[in-house]
Image (spheres, helix red, strand yellow):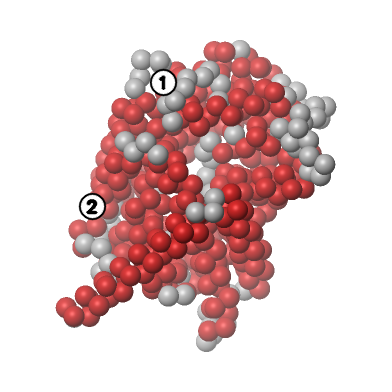
Amino acid sequence: MVGAGVFLSTGFMAQSLGPAHILLAWVIGAVLALCGAVAYAEVARLVPHSGGEYRYLSTLLHPSLGYLAGWASLLVGFSAPIALDALAAGAFARAVNSSLDPRVVGAVLIIGLTGLHALRLKVSARGQNVLVALKVLLLAGFVGVGVAAGTVAWPAWTPPHPSPSPWPDLVGSLFFIAFAFSGWNAAVYAADEFKAPERDVPRAMLLGCLSVGALYLVVNYLFVANLTPEQGAVVFHYDDFTSLKGQYEQVTLGQAVMAALLGPVAARVMSGVMVLLFVSAMSAMLLLGPRVYAAMARDGFLPAALEGHEGRPPAGAIVLQGALGLLLLVVHDVRTVLSNVGAILVLFAALTVSGLFRAAFTAKTAEQRPRLPALLAAGVYVASSGWMLWVGLQRSPTLFLWVAGVAVVAVGAWWATTMARRRTA
């Protein structure tokens, strides 16, 4: 879950919102993410199998929707973020050592992580656990430095461009905070590999969401307590920095805090921490995304070579995922693709959660019926997702055509695949 978002969003928000409203926005974002986790936990209880939205939508709503979600995951849902994270990791690596080529660094990381996760399940799991443990230790160290060397007193600054009412800007910021929390549902993609998926998958999502929500609040308090809006404005250089259009010493709030408290050397150390954050995120996506394609292969929607074997990772699907990530790494406008795909993924998550309402009406036993707290959480999550999609459509009117085009092509492909399978049956 923890990526660049938490180190960027508050810098943008501080230009029009004060400290109290910024922290309130992060609290609301955490509540909305937790509602999603509660709803997904119930979905995982009802459908305790790998495949994520592909499996859930196919089971709860209609196979064509699952097919659409699966192909979106394969082509860009995981591949585009892997490529962008690889490029960002390379950019921050260059900030540590100016002789490094960001694209070469990114390519090496994708190839290395692909090999790590394609070897053996134990090697894959241990490698990911090591990366997560290092990330947690470094983030704990960052918080420790902020508390020890900085201030925890309530900030006195005011935003340079306040609006007559803070609420429109606060509500608008939730769109970006939601993406900072994305990844809370990661456990569902590998549900079959848990010893007790009905218990452990919901537990993983809920504990992960709660702990990251608490971490985000502490980190953002350190930001607003130790940085002014002018210092936080370094985040406006982030896109140019990670797309290799410019080189800057500070582009995240983490670097800005470390520079303000300990000096430029500490900011460079924070660049190294950012590299690890991106590597950990890439590793998680290369671990989990291929589980979707393996599930599709088992159902006959993808070549059998992607299915893998019992007790071993789906090596074919992992290699395919890595190859797609490498391909997109050399595409210059991946960020535009990702912004469109982000909206589609929000749509799939909302559709998945809405499947609980259908299950409530079609359940034949009490065990198959979703529980009331999960239905309430699902209602909140679907409403917030609908609002985010509406905001996205207003910001980019072509988004609807993009989503509709993908849906038409994928549903058409599903129909053609279904007809072909019937003829060969």
- The kind of secondary structure element at disc 1 is helix
- The kind of secondary structure element at disc 2 is helix
Tag 2 residue: 316
Question: Is there any visible trace of residue 286 in the rendered image?
Answer: yes
Eyeballing the image, is 98 above or below 302? Answer: above
Question: Is there any visible trace of residue 309 in the rendered image?
Answer: no
Eyeballing the image, is 42 above or below 285? Answer: below
**Closer to us: 308 or 70:** 70
Q: Is residue 77 left or right of residue 17?
A: left
Q: Residue at x 44, y 41 (%)?
A: 335
Eyeballing the image, is 327 above or below 425? Answer: above
The image quadrant where one finds the C terminus is: bottom left
Upstream in sequence: badge 1 or badge 2: 1
Q: Is residue 159 left or right of residue 66?
A: right
**Residue 9 appears at what percent x and percent y?**
62, 37
Q: Residue at x 69, y 19 (%)?
A: 149
- The amino acid beneath tag 2 is Gly
**Residue 265 appears at what percent x and percent y?**
54, 13
Q: Residue at x 42, y 46 (%)?
A: 337
**Residue 369 appears at what percent x and percent y?**
57, 79
**Residue 142 appears at what percent x and percent y?**
60, 27
Circle 1 residues within 10 Å: few <14, some 14–19, many ≥20 = some
In the picture, the disc for residue 94 is 1
**Closer to us: 271 or 174:** 174
Image quarter for residue 93?
top left
Identity of the residue furthest to the left in this view: 424
Number of residue marks: 2
- The amino acid beneath tag 1 is Arg
Q: Residue at x 57, y 44 (%)?
A: 180
